[in-house]
């Protein structure tokens, strides 16, 4: 948001539940067994506001944070220095070195080229091992035990590709990771993301790295009952219209009224991250009433059915039905896309 305009009352916003965020982290920490839970806060804490999230989680006891790049590490440096460890998942380029060597954050080294770049500094680092996902990480056969033995390695980590599924790849990656640990003299070990926490103690090691589930995402049934919704988009009704049978609504007349009823026009749309996949599928909530989206979601406006909420009028607010699992089924988008895609023009308001 533009600070110069922040005094103007918004017509849509995101209500963020502090208690739900902290509860999610504590539950994931407990589910991690003997391991300690860290927190993935990359991409501006999945779009919710990294500085607020980090401050709340540090106060709750979180001591390890994971970001994507050095810009993200710099953004929280004043909050974490001396209080928590920060790991930069995308590693360290040559261009990153001037900042990285003086930063309290650690690079997660993803190649032997990065190892060679960092080793002369003598500073702490983490190592990412490619156990079968084939994104970032050092292949098992490329690990050079002699070089790694001379380094200050905090965390040896890897990442599961299909932790949200019951597939053989999970056990195969676990076996590869266990083999790699014989060659990496690290202080701590970390494999599990949010979904992998639910796979059980074999995957927990010393440190888990939840991300999506901190913010309300549930990828495995075992997490149900432990994870609460954190982000609830809310928007104002800027007009109430009365339709007659046969009236058309929105672009391409995707909705045609088959009876007389009222609709509400909402000040939100796909520019705010409420994408066209919700057209005729999504819904908004008022008290106990579910108010379906009618027709096509446009850039800044949405039409909803007010048949079950005749008391609503211009200027009233409604909640978006944005439980991540439900919204994913409605829109066809992944839970990750839904939470990170909430628009920047929606102010975040923590309660």
Image: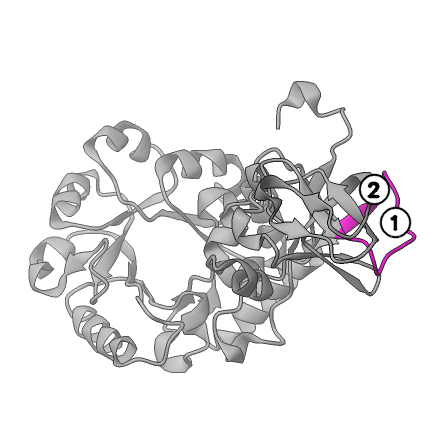
The percent position of residue 240, horizontal first and vertical second, equals 83, 42
- In whole angstroms, how far apart are the C-alphas of marks 2 and 1? 8 Å
How many discs mark residues in the rendered view? 2
Residue at image location 41% in from the left, 79% down from the top: 199
Q: Nearer the viewer, mark 2 or mark 1?
A: 2
Q: Which residue is mark 1?
A: 312
Drawn side of residue 303 relative to residue 273, left or right: right
Q: Main secondary structure of the magenta part?
A: loop
10 Å crowding of disc 1: few (<14), some (14-19), many (20+)? some
Query: For residue 116: magenta?
Result: no
Is residue 310 magenta-colored? Answer: yes
- Where is residue 129 shown, x and y percent of the image? 21, 61
Q: Which residue is mark 2?
A: 240
Q: Secondary structure at mark 1?
A: loop
Assign the N terminus to one quadrant of the image: top right
Q: Residue at x 67, y 18 (%)?
A: 4
Q: What are the residue bounds of the magenta stretch?
A: 305-318
């Amino acid at each position: 948001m533009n600070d110069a305009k922040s005094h103007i009352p918004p017509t849509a916003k995101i209500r963020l539940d502090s208690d739900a965020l902290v509860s999610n982290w504590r539950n994931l920490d407990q589910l991690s067994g003997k391991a300690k839970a860290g927190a993935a806060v990359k991409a501006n804490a999945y779009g919710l506001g990294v500085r607020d999230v980090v401050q709340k989680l540090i106060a709750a006891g979180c001591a390890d944070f994971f970001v994507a790049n050095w810009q993200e590490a710099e953004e929280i440096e004043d909050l974490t220095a001396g209080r928590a460890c920060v790991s930069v998942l995308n590693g360290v380029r040559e261009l990153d070195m001037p900042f990285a060597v003086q930063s309290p954050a650690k690079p997660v080294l993803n190649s032997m080229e990065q190892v060679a770049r960092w080793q002369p500094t003598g500073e702490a680092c983490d190592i990412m091992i490619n156990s079968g996902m084939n994104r970032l990480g050092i292949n098992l056969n490329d690990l050079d035990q002699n070089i790694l033995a001379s380094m200050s390695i905090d965390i040896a980590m890897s990442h599961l590709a299909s932790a949200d599924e019951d597939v053989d790849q999970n056990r195969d990656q676990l076996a590869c990771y266990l083999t790699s640990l014989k060659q990496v003299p690290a202080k701590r070990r970390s494999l599990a993301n949010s979904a992998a926490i639910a796979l059980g103690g074999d995957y927990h090691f010393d440190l888990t790295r939840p991300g999506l589930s901190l913010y309300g995402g549930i990828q495995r049934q075992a997490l149900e009952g432990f994870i609460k919704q954190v982000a609830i988009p809310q928007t104002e009704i800027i007009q109430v219209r009365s339709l007659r049978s046969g009236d058309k609504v929105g672009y391409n007349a995707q909705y045609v009224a088959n009876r007389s009823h009222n609709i509400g026009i909402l000040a939100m749309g796909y520019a705010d991250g409420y994408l066209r996949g919700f057209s005729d599928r999504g819904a908004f909530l008022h008290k106990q009433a579910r108010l379906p989206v009618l027709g096509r979601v446009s850039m800044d406006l949405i039409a909803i059915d007010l048949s079950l909420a005749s008391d609503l009028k211009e200027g009233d607010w409604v909640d978006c039905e944005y439980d991540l699992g439900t919204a994913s089924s409605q829109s066809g988008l992944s839970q990750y896309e839904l939470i990170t895609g909430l628009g920047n023009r929606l102010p975040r308001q923590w309660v």
